[in-house]
C-alpha cells in the first residue's frame, strides 16, 4: 500500500491502516499525527522515514517506519510500513509485590527489545527475587511447575534443560536465542500467573463462597428458631 506526502505537505493514504495496538490490544486504525514534510524529504533524500500515528482505540502514540520509494516534483511516495515498537507482554501486574513487579516488567521489556540474553538474566533475577519472600520449599514447587509447562508444551529435552538452567541454575546462565526465548517468555508468564494471580484469585473466590455459605447457614438457623418458637 502506498502513502504520499504531497507538495503542500498533505498526507495521503490509499486506504486506512489498522494494526494490533501494543498498548490496548485492539486491532485499531492508525491516525497520522506527525508526518514528514515534503521539503525536508526533498532536501535530505532519505531511504527511510518515520511517521507518528495515534491508536484510534486508545489514543496512545504509535511509531512506524516507511521506505521512501520515489521523490518527484509533486509528491513523495512511501511504502512498506513497519512498526518500530514491538508489542508489550500483557500481565496482571497488580497481583505482584512491588519489587517483583518492577523486575518482571523489565524482564518483559528485554524480551520486547529482542535482547534475549538480557531477558534470560532478568527472568532468573525475577524468580530469585520473588523467592526471597517465600518459604524455602518454594523453589522445588516452582521447578515442578516449570517442568510441567515444558512437558505440556512438548518442549525438546535440550531446550527444556537450558531453560531450567536459566531460571534455577547457580552457574552462569546458558546463552539463548529467539527460539528458546519464545518458549521462556510463556514459561515465565505462566509461572508468575500460577504463583501470584491464580493463587490470589482462588483465595478471593473461596473466601467469598465461605462467606455466603456462612450467611446462608445463619438465615436457615433464624428461620428454624422462628418455626420452633
Ligand atoms: Zn491502542
Image (cartoon, helix red, strand yellow):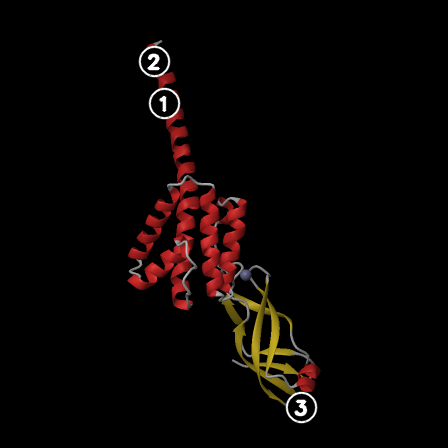
Q: Secondary structure at mark 2?
A: helix
Q: Residue furthest front?
A: 171
- Mark earlier in primary sequence (1, 2): 1
Query: Mark 2 and mark 1 in contact (Cβ < 8 Å)?
Result: no
User: Which quadrant of the figure contains the C terminus?
Assistant: top left
Q: x, y (%) of residue 151?
A: 29, 56
The foreground one among 152 and 158 is 158
Residue lying at 32% horizontally and 53% vertically, measured from the top left: 147
**Label placed on residue 55:** none
Which residue is denoted by mark 1 in the rendering?
217
**Label placed on residue 227:** 2
Residue 220 visible, this angle: yes
Q: Which picture quadrant has residue 164?
A: bottom left
Q: CA distance from mark 3 to mark 1?
A: 84 Å
For residue 108, side relative to residue 190 (left or right) = right
- Mark earlier in primary sequence (3, 2): 3
For residue 39, side relative to residue 206 (left or right) = right
Q: Secondary structure at mark 1?
A: helix
Tell me: residue 78, above or below residue 55: below
Tell me: residue 212, above or below residue 110: above
Amino acid at each position: 500500500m502506498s502513502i504520499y506526502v504531497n507538495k503542500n505537505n498533505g498526507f495521503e493514504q490509499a486506504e486506512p491502516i489498522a494494526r494490533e495496538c501494543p498498548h490496548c490490544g485492539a486491532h485499531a486504525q492508525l491516525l497520522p499525527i506527525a508526518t514528514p514534510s515534503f521539503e525536508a524529504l526533498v532536501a535530505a533524500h532519505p531511504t527511510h522515514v518515520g511517521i507518528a500515528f495515534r491508536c484510534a482505540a486508545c489514543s496512545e502514540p504509535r511509531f512506524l517506519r516507511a521506505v521512501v520509494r520515489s521523490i518527484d516534483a509533486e509528491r513523495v511516495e512511501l511504502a512498506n510500513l513497519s512498526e518500530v515498537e514491538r508489542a508489550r507482554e500483557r500481565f496482571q501486574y497488580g497481583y505482584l509485590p512491588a519489587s517483583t513487579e518492577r523486575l518482571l516488567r523489565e524482564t518483559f521489556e528485554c524480551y520486547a527489545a529482542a535482547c534475549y540474553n538480557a531477558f534470560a538474566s532478568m527472568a532468573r533475577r525475577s524468580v530469585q527475587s520473588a523467592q526471597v519472600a517465600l518459604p524455602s520449599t518454594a523453589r522445588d514447587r516452582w521447578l515442578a511447575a516449570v517442568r510441567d509447562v515444558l512437558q505440556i508444551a512438548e518442549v525438546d529435552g535440550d531446550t527444556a534443560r537450558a531453560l531450567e538452567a536459566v531460571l534455577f541454575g547457580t552457574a552462569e546462565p546458558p546463552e539463548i536465542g529467539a527460539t528458546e526465548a519464545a518458549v521462556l517468555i510463556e514459561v515465565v508468564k505462566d509461572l508468575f500467573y500460577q504463583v501470584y494471580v491464580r493463587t490470589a484469585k482462588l483465595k478471593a473466590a473461596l473466601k467469598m463462597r465461605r462467606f455466603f455459605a456462612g450467611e446462608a447457614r445463619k438465615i436457615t438457623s433464624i428461620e428454624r428458631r422462628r418455626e420452633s418458637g
